[in-house]
Each structure stands twice: as structure tokens, then as C-alpha cells.
Image: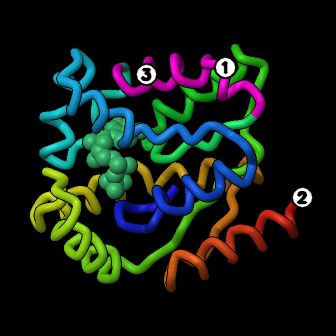
Amino acid sequence: MGPPGAGKGTQAVALAERIHGAHVSTGDIFRENVAKETELGQAAKRYMDAGEYVPDEVTNAMVADRLAQDDAREAFLLDGYPRTLDQVAKLDQILADLGSGLDGVIALTVVEDELIGRLLERAKVSGRSDDTEEVIRHRQEVYRNETAPLLAVYRDRGLLIEVDGMGTPEEVGARIAEALSTRA
Ligand code: ADP
């Protein structure tokens, strides 16, 4: 977990490899579907472009399908999901149905000014239609309102692992590895 620009994607790819698990990024799946102009892509695009969350029913159904696939059976890393309390409840149900569960929830913490700066930098190269300054600021606000409250939920469950997300990707990756090794 972490606000837009915290470096979730970068760290998630590396960590999924390390745990030999499927990397399940809801943002990536939505973008693929937008690019291929599928029905799902068409349903998601206008929300993404506005910096809003895609409706929970759409996102939850997509994650349920994805986690049922073979490559996610042994291990998976969720990147960008859950982001709402409704998604937390639905994820609990999906995992219970699969006889699975979460080992931990990693949250990257980064100060907001740094996040905006990173996203504006990324905007120059990403070509992502949601990387304009106005939408970037809105995405931070949506995160604060909708997703930040999830941290307390996972903290109460004893699953939350907070990691300082400032510094280079290598530094942050090393901190994640360290946090996981002291936990295991
Ligand atoms: P970031 O976290 O940097 O904004 P993502 O690639 O994770 O980027 O997500 C991009 C967009 O995809 C989000 O702004 C949102 O519209 C949509 N999205 C991704 N994950 C979810 C989710 N769990 N629930 C609803 N919408 C989502």
C-alpha cells in the first residue's frame, strides 16, 4: 500500500519476483484493458483519467478472477488493491473461498510534496493520461480519504509493515527486505 507516487509498482515487481509469486497490479490490469479497448477497459477509463477509483464491483470481480488463476496459487503480491473498505471485505471473502490469506501488508510512507514531485517527473515520460498536475493532486486526496483508513484496519490485524519510502528504489527495496526478514 501507499499513496500514488510512493513507488509501489517498482517495489512490487521486485518483491513478487523474490517470493516467486504472481504480481497482481490492478492499475496495470486496467491499463492493459484500456489499451486493448476491452469492455473492462471501457468501464474503467473515465474513472482513471479523472483520478477516481474504478467502482468496487468492477475491481473486485477482476481481482477475484485474477487470484483464481494458476500462477497465483502458491504466492501472490497485490499491488494497488485493496483501496477501499469495501475492497478489504471482498478480499477477505475471495481469500477465504480460495483457502488463502494475507501474510502481511507493506505500506510505503512518503511525504506528500515528494510524491507530487515524483509524479510530475514521471508525467514527462509515462504518457499516462492521469499524470497531469490537477489529476495527480486529486489522486492524493482520494488516497487520503478512501485508502489511508485501511492502514488502521491492517494494523489492528497485526499485518501492517510500515516502510520508509524515501530514497532510491534500491534503498527502499533493502528496507523492505530487512523488514520482512525480521518478521519471518
Ligand atoms: P497510482 O497508485 O500511481 O495512482 P495505479 O497504477 O495503481 O496508480 O492505479 C491507476 C488507476 O487505476 C487509479 O487511479 C484508479 O483509477 C485505478 N485503480 C487501480 N487500482 C484500483 C483499485 N483497487 N480500486 C479502484 N480503482 C483502482
> Is 63 in the magenta?
yes
The amino acid pointed to by label 3 is Met
Question: In the rendered structure, which disc, 3 or 1, sits on the residue that comes first in sequence?
Answer: 3
Span colored in magenta: 58-74
Front residue (pair 150, 126): 126
Q: Which mark is residue 184?
A: 2
Amino acid found under the numbered disc labelled 1: Asp
What's the distance in space between the residues labelled 2 and 3, CA to CA?
Answer: 30 Å
- Residue positioned 37% across, 41% down in the render: 28
Asked if the residue at tag 3 contacts the one at tag 2, i.e. Cβ–Cβ closer than 8 Å, the answer is no
Q: Residue at x 64, y 68 (%)?
A: 162
Q: Report the magenta stretch's main SS.
A: helix
Residue 6 disc label: none
Q: What number is the disc on residue 70?
A: 1
- Residue under numbered circle 3: 62
24 relative to 162, above or below = above
Dividing the picture into quadrants, the one containing residue 20 is top right
Relative height, residue 49 to residue 66 (above, below) = below
Vertical side of 79 occupied by 152: above or below: below
- List x then y, in percent, for residue 159: 73, 52
Q: Quadrant location of the C terminus? A: bottom right
Q: Can residue 145 be seen in this snapshot?
A: no
Quarter of image, res 126: bottom left
CA gap, disc 3 and disc 1: 15 Å
- The answer to which of 89 and 23 lies nearer the viewer is 23
Q: Position of residue 45 (x, y in %)?
A: 17, 33
Horizontal side of 10 relative to 138 (left or right) equals right
Q: Which residue is pictured at 44% across the width and 43% down the height?
A: 83
From where the camera sits, is residue 172 visible?
A: yes
Q: Earlier in the sequence, mark 1 or mark 2?
A: 1
Report the front residue among 80 and 10.
10
Magenta span has 154? Answer: no
